[in-house]
Amino acid sequence: MERQHHLLRGIPVLASLNIKKTVDFYKSKLGFNRVGYLDDNYAVIARDHFVVHFWKCNDKIHPEHTSCYVDVKDIDILYKELQAFDVIHPNGKLENKPYGMREFSILDHDGNLIKFGQELHP
């Protein structure tokens, strides 16, 4: 039996200690320019084709143990853009990985780790 293709995309749902501060961080530091929903307990924001949801939590253990991975193009340009906002993780500088990706990572103000990667082409 042939399997149908039902899965369209994944959207991370990350923890936030303060929804409005989180949205401000993603807008001012990471260039997110679309807000689909925002209240004190939940937010949906986007930049380009990347959508992320945030839920309100009261324990920093949740964001500090959460991450997501974002496929990008023109990673060197994005890296320079985000480097100017001093959000690059100290151990997440831009580099080529042995598994065929060029990637870097950032930490948001709550501790969520966001990894950005672009496939290396031979």
Image: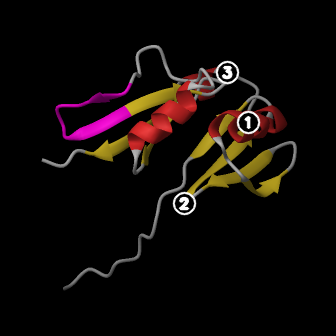
In the rendered image, residue 31, in percent from the top left (x then y), is placed at 66, 43
Q: Which mark is in front, 1 or 2? A: 1
Query: Observer-nearest residue: 56 or 52?
Result: 52
The residue indicated by pointer 1 is: 28
The residue indicated by pointer 2 is: 49
Q: Which mark is in front, 1 or 3? A: 1
The outermost residue toward the bottom is 1
Q: Quadrant of residue 30?
A: top right
* Residue 5 sits above or below residue 10 on the image: below
The residue indicated by pointer 3 is: 60
99 vs 33, left or right, is: left
98 vs 82, left or right, is: left
* Residue 78 sits above or below residue 110 on the image: below
Disc 2 marks a residue whose amino acid type is His
| Helix, strand or loop at mark 1 | helix
Rendered residue at 71%/42% (across/down): 55
| Helix, strand or loop at mark 3 | loop
- Marks 1 and 3, Cα distance to the nearest angstrom? 22 Å
- Marks 3 and 2, Cα distance to the nearest angstrom? 28 Å
Q: Earlier in the sequence, mark 1 or mark 2?
A: 1
Q: In which quarter of the image is residue 2?
A: bottom left
Disc 1 marks a residue whose amino acid type is Ser
Rendered residue at 57%/22% (across/down): 64
Rendered residue at 75%/28% (across/down): 17
Q: Which of marks 3 and 2 is nearer the N terminus?
A: 2
The outermost residue toward the left is 122
Magenta-colored span = 94-103
* Residue 99 sits above or below residue 50 on the image: above
Asked whether disc 3 touches disc 2, contact meaning CB atoms under 8 Å apart, the reply is no
Few, some or many C-alpha atoms within 10 Å of disc 1 (few <14, some 14-19, many ≥20)?
A: few
Few, some or many C-alpha atoms within 10 Å of disc 3 (few <14, some 14-19, many ≥20)?
A: some
